[in-house]
Image (tube, helix red, strand yellow):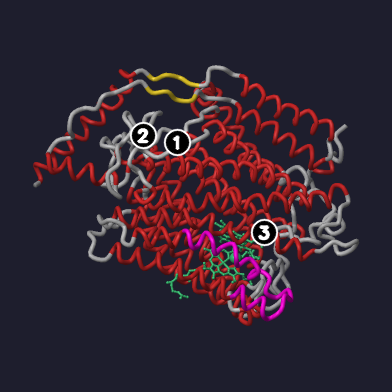
Amino acid sequence: MLGKLNWGAIPIDQPIPLIAAGAIGLILAGVLAWITRAGHWPYLWREWITSVDHKRIGVMYVLLGLVMLIRGFVDAIMMRTQQAAAIGGAQGYLPPEHYDQLFSAHGTIMIFFGAMPFIIGLMNFVVPLQLGVRDVAFPTLNSVSFWLTAAGALLVNASLVIGEFARTGWLPYAPLSETGYSPGVGVDYYLWAIQISGVGTLMSGVNLVTTILKLRAPGMSYLRMPMFCWTALGSNMLIVAAFPILTATLAMLTLDRYLGFHFFTNEAGGNPMMFMNLIWAWGHPEVYILVLPAFGIFSETFSTFSSKPLFGYRSMVLATLFIVVVSFTVWLHHFFTMGAGGDVNAAFGIATSVIAVGTGVKVFNWLFTMYGGRVRFATPMLWSIAFMLVFVVGGMTGVLLAVPPADFLLHNSMFLVAHFHNVIVGGVVFGAFAGLTYWFPKAFGFRLDERWGQIAFWLSITGFVIVFGAMYVLGLEGMTRRLQHIDNVEWAPGIYVAGGGMVFMLLGVVAQVTQLVVSIRNRDALRDETGDPWDGRSLEWSTASPPPSFNFAVLPDVHGEEAYWTVKERARKEQSLGDAPQYEAVHMPRNSATGFVTAFFATLTGFALVWHIWWLVAVSLVGAYATFVAFAWRDEGEVEIAADTVAAADRARRTARQAWLDRQEGAA
Ligand code: HEA
Ligand code: HEM
Ligand SMILES: [Cu+2]
């Protein structure tokens, strides 16, 4: 009846996951109970869970990303403390099979459910606003994408209590991940969680590419798009091209595990090297999927907070497209040591180093954007400057790893671990925080507390330098990755230093949460009436904060590269906002439960497949299909928002804007 599932799946003999799961369960039950008591369910269902508004979906994506970053951070604390507690004769508190699940879960959660949702959420929220349009191309599909991602996150976290997670690393290398070496359900959880969320990511990629290519405000030609839209286009083109490779690779591994195929086995004609090639053909582009939008965020913040247009806009566009193409030609640098031969290694090493040229162009453009500008050191700008300093180091160590002879020494060492955290945390996570603090007032109508933001920043950057600086040293001293126990006591100082740095990082996380709480409590004092708290240059700042459901009362008419700056300049010169526009009724897509219900069935499907509960697989697949059919048959797809409502929504913003203009005149 329940396939392989029985009471043995609950890890009663392992107190740590049980206590962790118990605590999470209690918090979750508390939150649910509070929502029920306060009677918030109808509101949540109507306005959020079934919402197809790209802004709401973007916010939910970011929230998912934040929660999962904290979840992955807890794993990181456990890894660092385990290593510090298991040197020489000491054994630490985590047995090897648990430590292996820990780094696998940490990597998987951080990449797929922390960084990806965070970045996709920011793109979802910002891109339509910057393009001057009312939503993405396929709003309901957008909701499906989000909920499928959440379903994957749920499955990974469920594995903590029901069964186990993969012990194979964040990419389940074959043949280790084949049934013979990984007989448990861990790899199956990995496979279905990533397949389900991967479908969501692919659809979100199709959605955003279509939006950017097809839906732009009148006058918004390609070369007038803000830089963030360009990098979002690059990132989503990479998603559309790369994610099918991931899906196919994992599908083949699934066939191996479930039906006894031999794609990646050592015998019967299988070839494990095929897995390496395929997984990295997706895996390398994936890191640029993450970092390109972060580059876009920095382009926005450097320009806004330097009060200058972005330097070298066209070269930035070219560098972005260059990175998109070249990132598909370098995958082999992840397994230089596996014997492809000197010529092949040299070719891929050179291709890898060439990417540094594209990134270098960007770094110099950001520097020149700041040069001669009136630089304001607000929190988003602090994250951006810190990014530029640390990312150059991380990039350089990447170029070092791209030299095959050097990589033979450094492959699988802590130096490699330091390299990629240096670029992912320093690039993607700092970018996400810059974006969060930059666009938060747009999403919620009030700014984040600046003082706590700065405290969080300084704590995090201090911790970052200590933790990953120590890891570089450990790597050069020969320490390899994924060690549950440390035999060589000479590494102890480095491991203690890295552990000490974690204290600063932890305080940084606490400060970020405090910032959020303090800001929400002081929201009236932090209110942003004008919709433009940073003196921004692109269209998202031309509408109210938070923007109405239809984004713009009247679709903007774009002149020039900096759409909103041009409008503001004219208003400043003429000391007037111009006449109120002609308002018309707006049609917006109706909310839909399709995404949530599909994801509900997808979660069941995934869970049932992990545990071989075949009847449940059948039932939930039918359920998911029926949801789509029901959606296709609905005949009322849109709601009309009357012209009066649109006008009323715009009036408040115009009044605040006029007051701002008058103040400017007073100051002049
Ligand atoms: C956001 C993520 C991200 C980014 C941006 C990068 C960027 C780069 N990475 Fe990294 N990398 C990872 C994430 C990332 N990487 C991950 C996750 C892994 C390991 C996964 C695993 O094994 O589990 C990895 C592993 C990895 C390896 C494999 C090593 C091994 O397994 O032994 C290599 C080897 O070539 C490499 C190289 C590079 C290079 C050359 C860049 C370049 O793009 C960097 C370019 C930037 C600069 C160089 C700085 C700025 C430039 C200038 C200021 C101009 C002047 C500079 C020069 C002319 C040099 N990376
Ligand atoms: C914020 C602080 C972080 C710390 C202190 C940290 C620490 C660590 C440590 C100690 C390891 C394992 C090293 C080993 O034993 O091999 C690791 C692995 C990893 N981390 Fe992090 N990490 C952090 C954030 C992140 C983020 C934000 C991401 C991605 C977005 C990430 C992605 C990974 C990946 C992919 C691995 C490899 C897992 C594997 O070996 O399969 N980490 N991290
Ligand atoms: Cu790579």
Q: Which residue is mark 3?
A: 103
501 inside magenta stretch: no
Q: Which residue is mark 1?
A: 55
Q: Choose the circle earlier in sequence order: 2 or 3.
A: 3
334 inside magenta stretch: yes
- Is the CB–ligand 2 distance for label 3 below 8 Å? yes
Rendering quadrant holding ligand 3: bottom right
Residue farthest to the right, as pictured:
268
Q: Which mark is residue 546?
A: 2
Q: Are marks 2 and 1 in contact (CB under 8 Å)?
A: yes
Q: Position of residue 271 (x, y in %)?
A: 81, 64
Q: Are marks 2 and 3 in contact (CB under 8 Å)?
A: no
Q: Residues within 10 Å of mark 2 (few under 14, many from 20)?
A: some
Q: Is residue 150 visible?
A: yes
Question: Which residue is located at x 39 percent, y 20 percent?
Answer: 641
Is 626 positioned to the left or the right of 439 in the image? Answer: right
Label 1 vs label 3, nearer the camera:
1
Q: Position of residue 360 (x, y in %)?
A: 42, 69
Magenta range: 321-349
